[in-house]
Amino acid sequence: MSVAWWREGGRVYAPLSACVAWFNLMHVPQAFTSSGWVVGDLPSPAQAPPSSGPLFIWYWQPAHGDEVTYAGPIDAHAIAKSGQVYVDVDALQQLLAAFHVQTRWQGSQLAVIDPAPQVSLPSWGVASSAYQVQGDLWPEPWFYGEAGVTSSALYNPLTPVLPLRLKAQDGFSGEAMITVRSLARADEVHRYSARMIHGALDATIRLPFTGLLGVEVDEVLNASTLKLRLLAYSRAIESAAPNLSLQSLGLLQSWFVNHNESPQVAELAASIAHTSPGARALSPQQVDAEIQAISDWASLHIWYNWPAYLHGQVPWQQMTTTLSLHEGVCQDISGVAAGLLRALGIPALVVQGQGLGQLGWGPHQWDEAWDGQRWVVFDPTFDAVYTSDQGIAPPSSVTHHDFDPPPSEFGQTHRGGQIADW
């Protein structure tokens, strides 16, 4: 931002209008009251700034956990020149430091250093607690679906994360669906899954889109029919971070692939691959062997739900549900394979397109997994050989016709294909 500095009496001053514009860019609420310039909270109606005399800067900051305390005032050493109010740069730096923003005066410029704290989330984009870090000063603008719902988390629009600490009086325990929508583009939607315990939701999610976002949190009363009860919603969550790529979006946890919610998933994946989850120094060939072991396991142990498919009653079930039921259709089988691989630390994507099955071409899902050098394409659903399409039963055998085949061969039974984001 270009600023016309004013120098007088050994001090450097910045126009108050530029300071206000600067904090507007940082999405910081502010107002002028009879007490002075209030930054970060709006406790009283806005008034005109003083034209002369002292100007005090008031601000707020988290002290311990969610407790919010006032700090200040900072004497702005304000002066009036040519109808404008100017603020001492030293006072401005004190204010920015209170917001955990580092600055340095460089003679004719005020440099801002790392204004957005870096928040480290798991690769799948969901943490099982509400992270609060320096710079989280803005109350989340929630509306509530019913009486008695409260929120105690703060966030920072400059970071791409949203801490969620919601409490409902209903004492609900089960799944929560968290829907994030871009308000600028209707096709940008992502749905997360998180656990609620005794009416409490405590999590942090990666905001995948930039700009103004709509976020909705629902209690899932019935997962098979997706019967929801609204907990909280907002159409005023902001993120200054750029949009994630489609590939990065596809690698996030979702309502559908919720592998991180159960420790048993990682244990199962490790037992299938005869290895341990997490960071491992393996060659691409060793990773390929693990991908094939997971694919074979999904083919053998998630039985195809022929009655649901033939009657058009395809369930919308989570990966953890599919593991417990041991049955599903192509999206469930590919979702289990992707989730098990991610639990091992292997990036895996579900791909949706069309497959050539017994009834001709139709909607279908398969997988891709990264072995460190390339994306390995495989279809655990088509690799399972069934002798009957009447009931739910284990396959008679597993082939590898659809595990890492030549593209020309794979293209004979698969077409289209884009990264699925559920």
Image (cartoon, rainbow, N blue to C red):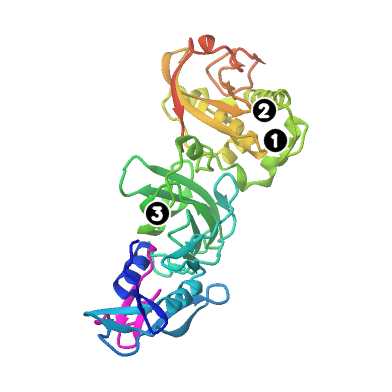
Is 189 left or right of 32, judged from the image as shown? Answer: right
Query: Dot 3: what SS?
Result: strand
Residue 411 is situated, as x and y percent measured from the top left of the image, at: 48, 12
**Would you say residue 36 sits in the magenta stretch?**
yes
63 vs 47, nearest the viewer = 47
Which amino acid type corresponds to the residue marked 1 in the rendered image? Answer: Ala
> Which residue position holds label 1?
269
413 vs 74, nearest the viewer = 74
Name which of mark 1 and mark 2 comes first in the sequence. 1
The stretch of residues the image draws in magenta is 26-48
Query: Dot 2: what SS?
Result: helix
Asked whether disc 1 touches disc 3, contact meaning CB atoms under 8 Å apart, the reply is no
Asked whether disc 1 touches disc 2, contact meaning CB atoms under 8 Å apart, the reply is yes
Residue 407 - label: none
Residue 294 - label: 2
Which amino acid type corresponds to the residue marked 2 in the rendered image? Answer: Ile
115 vs 382, nearest the viewer = 115
- State the image quarter where residue 334 is shown: top right
Badge 2 crowding class, 10 Å Cα cut-off, few under 14, some 14 to 19, many 20 or more, is many
Query: Dot 1: what SS?
Result: helix
- On the question of residue 352 being in view, the answer is yes
Position above or below: 186 against 332? below
Residue 20 is situated, as x and y percent measured from the top left of the image, at: 33, 71
- Residue for point 53% across, 16% down: 389
- Residue for point 45% across, 46% down: 208
**Mark 1 and mark 3: Cα distance apart in space:** 32 Å
Position above or below: 406 against 196? above
> Which residue position holds label 3?
215
**Mark 1 and mark 2: Cα distance apart in space:** 7 Å
Main SS category, magenta section = loop
So how many labels did they put on this image? 3
